[in-house]
Structures are given as structure tokens and as C-alpha cells.
Amino acid sequence: MTAFDPTEIQVVSCDIFGTTVDWFTGVSEQAADVFRTAGVDLDAEAFTNQWRDMYRPAMQCVRDGERSWVYLDTLHRESLDHLLGRHNVGAALDEDARARLVRAWHLLPAWPDSIEGLARLRKRYTMAALSNGGFALLTRLVKAANLPFDCILSAEQARAYKPAPQVYRTAAGLLDVEPAQILMVVAHSLGHRRRPPGRPAHRLPRTPSRKGSRPQSRPRRRHPQRPDRHQLHRTRRKTGLLKAFETVRPFLEPAAVLRSNVGWYG
């Protein structure tokens, strides 16, 4: 294994849902408004979590070849229809209400430190959004949240969902860099694993988990000098995204990529 050389990094690509925007608050608040308008008595926060729980299995069907490629909006709509039926409120929500709920994923608030942190990183790196969201979704989301990305890279451009290798290869190809020259930033506690054969060698730091990123607690082996999540969280609260990024960067392993279950986030 070669030593990590941060000078190789040219592009910082950021996960979106949970990393730079708060999907839980954004979707649940919009869902609550839709439910009130329709006279539906549903817990919008519980509904949002249930809806998100259907996200990964829906994408896995595409990854496994059980169905052809479809946009994330299509998967969201299908799971929404199923969930409304499960709660026996399907008749109360018309087409306009359902479309508004699907579009809720296009209008999500940025985390308080995201804009400043991305702007500071942008002075040194090309900043790219890299998400399982569709291109139109990401365009609207980035514009509405005022996120200072240089470009948007969508799984739609590869017609595959992360962590399929073609998503990362497509990103590298579009930006004319080697996969190892892209740093993939995510904000969840799933960690990373060594690159399997054929997987691009994206670098991977983890920023501290946030409420909207659905962290999963599990025991893990800790580097004796590696800063833990609580330390990184304190760093982020005090100094923002850039300082947290600089804290974790010296401990990055080369050839590190997202775990296979990163598709949960997008």
C-alpha cells in the first residue's frame, strides 16, 4: 500500500443527503405541511424515516439487475405510493400532493456549516456534488440550498447507483482525473473498507455523523492516534467543515472507498 499523498487530490466530491443537506428535517417538514393540507393524521417524522428505509432496497433492485435503470424520483414515487397504501391514506392524497412529496427531496436545507465549509475548500480544490440523486434533483437542490459546488455529478450520468464502480469511473472521466485524485466526503458512521478488485481508488474521509444522516452505531477498531467521531464533531462545531476535513485528512488510507451499503445515503 502506497502512502497517502494529499497533494494528489484535485477534486473533492461530496455526498449530498445527510452530508451537505439535512434530508430528515427538509422532507419531514414538507411532508407535515402536505398532510395538514390533505387532512391526514400521520406522524411526518416517522413517515419520513419509513420512506427513507425503502430507499436502499429500491436501488439494490437496480444494482442487481432485477429492473432496468430508473431515476431516483421514480424510486421515491413508487415507495411513496406503497407507504401511503400501508398507512391506508392513499385516497386522501391526490397526484399533486404526491408530486409535492417527491419534490420535497429537491428542496432540502443545507447544514449550518456547509456553505462556508464548501466555499473555503473550493479555494483549493474543484468541488463536486456526487450523489445518487438525479441530475434535475441535484440541480434544483444545489441552487435552492445555495451550495457552492463547481459541478454536479449524478448517478444518472453513469446510469447506475453508488457504490457501483461505474459511478466513480464516470465522475473521474468527466473531470479528466484519475480516480485516486478524487476525495469522496461522506457524513455517516458506516466507515470504509479496502478497495475490492475493479473498484476505483477514491480517497475517503468521513465527516462527523449528523441527525439527518442516519448513523448506525457499531464497534470498530480504532487507529491508536486517529481522532474519534466525538473529537471530529467538536472540531466541526467550533471551526466548520474545513477544519474537520483537515483533522481527518492525515489518517486517510489510500485506495479507500465507500462501503457497499453507502447507497443508503446518496
Image (cartoon, helix red, strand yellow):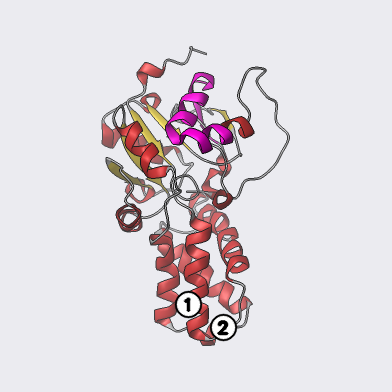
What percent of the width, then of the height, locates residue 76? 47, 64
- Please state if 147 lies on the left or on the right of 16 as rendered: left
Q: Main secondary structure of the magenta part?
A: helix
Q: Which mark is residue 34?
A: 1
User: Is-magenta flag for residue 254?
Assistant: yes
Q: At numbered mark 1, what does the secondary structure look like: helix, strand or loop?
A: helix
| 249 or 156, nearer to the observer | 249
Q: Are marks 1 and 2 in contact (CB under 8 Å)?
A: yes
| 245 or 181, nearer to the observer | 245
Q: At numbered mark 2, what does the secondary structure look like: helix, strand or loop?
A: loop
Disc with the residue nearer the chain's start (1 vs 2) = 1
Rate crowding at label 2 as few (under 14), some (14 to 19) or many (20 or more) other CA atoms within 10 Å. Answer: some
- Please state if 126 lies on the left or on the right of 251 as rendered: left
Q: CA distance from mark 1 to mark 2?
A: 8 Å
What kind of residue is marked 2? Val
Q: Classify 194 as above or below 106.
A: above
What kind of residue is marked 1? Val
| 112 or 266, nearer to the observer | 112
x 52%, y 50%: residue: 64
What percent of the width, then of the height, locates residue 234? 58, 34
x 50%, y 19%: residue: 250
Residue receiving disc 2: 40
User: Is-magenta flag for residue 78?
Assistant: no
Q: Classify 78 as above or below 8.
A: below
- Please state if 5 lies on the left or on the right of 150 as rendered: right
Q: Which residues are magenta?
A: 233-258
What percent of the width, then of the height, locates residue 14? 41, 40
| 64 or 172, nearer to the observer | 172
